[in-house]
Image (cartoon, grey):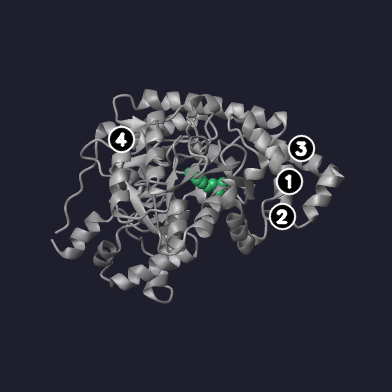
Amino acid sequence: MSIQDKARQRCSWLPSAEVPEGPRYKTLANQIATAIATGELKPGERLPPQRLLADALQVTVGTITRAYREAERRGLVEARVGSGTRVRGMQADTPDFHHLSRATTDSIDLSLSVPIPNPLRAQQLSAVLSRVSEQASELGSALDYQSEQGSQRQREQLAAWLTEQGLATDAKDLILTIGGQHADYLTLQSLIRPGEAVASDALTYPGMIAAARQLGLKHLPVSMDREGMRPDALERLCQRQRIRLLYLMPEHNNPTAAHMTQHRREEIVRIARKYDLLLLEDGVQFVRSELRGTPFYQLAPERSLYIFSVSKILSGGLRFGCLRAPGNLIPQLCAGLRAQCWASPGLMGSVACEWLGSADSSLLIDWQWQELNARHALLEKTFSGYDFLGHPCGFHAWLHLPEPWRTSDFIDQAAQRGVTLISPEPFCVGSQPAPQAIRICLTPPAHREALEIGLNRLAELLAEGPRLTAPLV
Ligand SMILES: Cc1ncc(COP(=O)(O)O)c(C=O)c1O
């Protein structure tokens, strides 16, 4: 069999005939567009590896690269390092209310960590906006430039709300930020110099990886287990290398769902004091107080920063959050924030604080926690017997794939069954290899039934095992 024939056999997709238009790469980009429009290529589906398609079509790899780039420029596909080029999911482009239709049209998104869609969100926001618009003094101060730390009144409202949630907070320790990612970036930019080192769990939130990279920091991975970061591994790293800051998600690691025990938190504090590390706790994956451990800022107040945002409980679009920091670091953080944006928008703060402080928000947040609990139970039922980790109010779970599954095959084959997942690659710090495991987000489907269908499809896939593909020689 010729190389071309073998490659054609191995390609998961081949373009059908199309009238050539200009250069070959453009024709191929058009063919990709047609295949997506007709449903032949589905959201999340991976395009064939470039070399394979080049062999199959008898063109150069450069032609395929240009075609994929052209398709990406048109917003049809997206390229991710380590996981190839995939047809863009609807999730990336459309708001939450499309989830239901996707569930019934055979494609279920379990790839993103977003609040559970509920029409109540928009209804509540509408009521909040009209209340804010009727408060002349609130509108007046929203028109003013704010101090770098943010409005005193909003910090007091937020501190009162956090305290009610079991996170005792004083307004003077808060800096209002444009969401959690901003607080992550602000901390690194203000407190760590380029070339200095920060460390985190080996699998961590990609926004932190991006921020450290953007700022030219060394980002070192620390091995972890089901309780999160391993103190012995951290201590060994500190003996070898000067670390300035440790980034932690003790309640619910994104992506592994690891939850840190009290003993482990105390061990981390002991090491942080011994080696003089700052501790940055990211609490954006917000869990209810009864299930929460002691935050680091209570265990080691002199060196701990804490991040909160409304993104997972109310809305990611509001871009509102805060950074709680020890008093001696506030001036440096304020100087950093001033250099970036002067201050967070006062109007957004008014809206978020009015919403948080209302009885409406408790209704919504409690509903989401109950719903997460029920979704978690569904997950436990579906994957009993498999090695996975979740949390009763966590947005995602982490499933170790049984042998001989490889994650990329699992993602591909799930996409063919209409379930969208994302690769663990973006969560890997440095050049750490990605594990054969997958994050399953429980929140994008609007209805539990759609989630159940998606989970069942994944369970069926696991039970059947990977489809064998002939090796390419
Ligand atoms: C751990 C963690 N930190 C920060 C963020 C970003 O938060 P925000 O949307 O408030 O910027 C996310 C979002 O998924 C997250 O999972």
Residue bearing the label numbered 3: 127
Q: Are marks 3 and 2 in contact (CB under 8 Å)?
A: no
Question: Mark 4 or 1 closer to N-term?
Answer: 1
Q: Are marks 4 and 3 in contact (CB under 8 Å)?
A: no
Residue bearing the label numbered 1: 152
Question: Mark 1 or 3 closer to N-term?
Answer: 3
Residue bearing the label numbered 2: 147
Amino acid tagged 2: Ser
Question: Quick one: SS at disc 2?
Answer: loop
Question: Mark 4 or 3 closer to N-term?
Answer: 3
Res 461 label:
4
Q: Residue furthest bottom?
A: 22
Amino acid tagged 4: Leu
The quadrant of the picture occupied by the N terminus is bottom left
Question: As rendered, which of 69 and 159 lies closer to the eye?
Answer: 159
Which residue is painted at 82% across and 49% down in the image?
139
Q: Could you give the CA–CA distance between mark 4 and mark 3, rounded to whole angstroms?
A: 45 Å
Question: Mark 3 or 2 closer to N-term?
Answer: 3
Q: Could you give the CA–CA distance between mark 2 and mark 4, rounded to whole angstroms?
A: 54 Å
- Specify few, some or many for label 4: CA neighbours under 10 Å numbering under 14, 14-19, or 20 or more: some
Residue 264 picture location, percent across and down: 37, 33
Residue 77 vertical position relative to residue 112 in the rendered view, above or below: below
The quadrant of the picture occupied by the C terminus is bottom left
Amino acid tagged 1: Gln
Q: Note whether residue 340 is visible.
A: yes
Q: Could you give the CA–CA distance between mark 4 and mark 1, rounded to whole angstroms?
A: 54 Å
Question: Mark 1 or 2 closer to N-term?
Answer: 2
Question: As rendered, which of 216 and 29 lies closer to the eye?
Answer: 216
